[in-house]
Image (cartoon, helix red, strand yellow):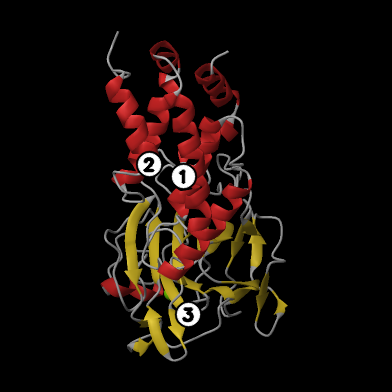
Amino acid sequence: MTQSKMWVGAAAVGAAATAALAGLYGDTPDARHAWSVHDMNRPRPPVIQAMPNRPPSDAVVLFDGSSLDAWVSGKDEPCKWKIVEGGAMEVVPKTGEIRTKESFGDCQLHIEFATPAKVEGSSQGRGNSGVFLMGMHEVQVLDCFENDTYPDGQCASVYGENPPLVNACRRPGEWQTYDIIFHQPLWEGETLKRPGSVTVLHNGVLVQDHWEFEGLSTHCQRRPLKPYANKLPLRLQDHGNPMRFRNIWIREIPSRYANTTHGGPAANEADVTALRQKTAARLFESANPGDANKVAALHRLLEVIAYDKADTYLKPTVEVAEAYLKELGGLDAQKLQDRKGDIIGLRNACNVLTRNKVVAEDFVLKAGLQRLINEHGLEKKR
Ligand code: MG
């Protein structure tokens, strides 16, 4: 079997070989990106189950109709709201807000609600409750089906700050959904670094599009943001109406600014460099410059220097490249034709590095392979 066929065969065997090539497939890491484009070395996201009409498998279920155990009233007293027919919980007016026993920070929240079928009151007095994220930021819950009120306090508003983009309210008594993506403000001491944000889908319709908080929710006043704990309970408001809720689940999510190693608003060059160096060291361990299969060794080594072109990695790469070019130099025209798959494949990998300025155009391996390709017409169609 020729080396070319061996390589093709090995590549077909499994993902490991694919991974060996993948770092040289898309643009290489740079100051803001620790991974290549389409990088197979990049860690995979966790696998979860997302089945129809069920909470995602990684969600914390806060209410599924069976118990109010996840909630408390007052000073850690048992929840004073009640479970009613149809797997819902209902506000018992004047018993006060309820809050989760557990605390949460940045999150995705799903919650369903129904305003009373029997319409009573008007404006803010009709079917009022509220979802208080971390107990601080209210996404208003209100019966706004043909019920006028101040827009920054209507259903799906960020209360006192921002009206929803549209009024997507269903009729009184009908079940409605909120899907909320919340990021808390970020502080360094007393200095606000990021204001935090909320995105809300009401009945599947985008109504708050990454609204950045101006303050803490309150009535009538602009109350400025101020630091609070990283995790706090979710609160539901008792505004004196027998509102119902069901199917409440929450997923904690990373801060929008947690990713410091791959693009995005918080990319940090020092963190990127550290991860690139770590990845290079890990890949170099399996690179084996002494591999009898110099093609496989070179693919791995070229990938290593895409992450980190320190002399520790560049030197053995150049040594293996020179040995490989010497080996090719001793072959006749037919044997070179037999190996053209290897030769062109490695030259292509070098092209990714030169395109990204990891190495110069005169890099020994690229220059040597290109010369052979030109001299022997290896890219000519036969
Ligand atoms: Mg309210």
Residue at the image position 42 percent from the left and 25 percent from the top: 329
- With 154 as the anchor, is 94 left or right in this view? right
Image quarter (top left, top right, bottom left or bottom right) of the N terminus:
top right
Amino acid carrying label 1: it is: Val
Element type at mark 2 = helix
Residue 252 drawn above or below residue 280: below
Element type at mark 1 = helix
State the residue position of label 2: 364
Residue 298 position, x and y percent, is: 50, 37
Amino acid carrying label 3: it is: Met
Name the N-terminal-most of marks 2 and 1.
1
Seen from the viewer's position, the closer of residues 222 and 256 is 256
Residue 189 position, x and y percent, is: 47, 90
Residue 286 position, x and y percent, is: 63, 44
State the residue position of label 3: 136
Q: CA distance from mark 2 to mark 1?
A: 7 Å
Residue at the image position 58 percent from the left and 48 percent from the top: 284
Residue 8 position, x and y percent, is: 52, 21
- With 210 as the anchor, is 320 left or right in this view? right
**Viewer-nearest of labels 3 and 2?**
2
Residue at the image position 39 percent from the left and 56 percent from the top: 202
Q: CA distance from mark 3 to mark 2?
A: 61 Å
Asked if disc 2 and disc 1 are in contact, CB closer than 8 Å, the reply is yes
State the residue position of label 1: 318
Amino acid carrying label 2: it is: Val
Residue farthest to the bottom? 190
Seen from the viewer's position, the closer of residues 44 and 132 is 44
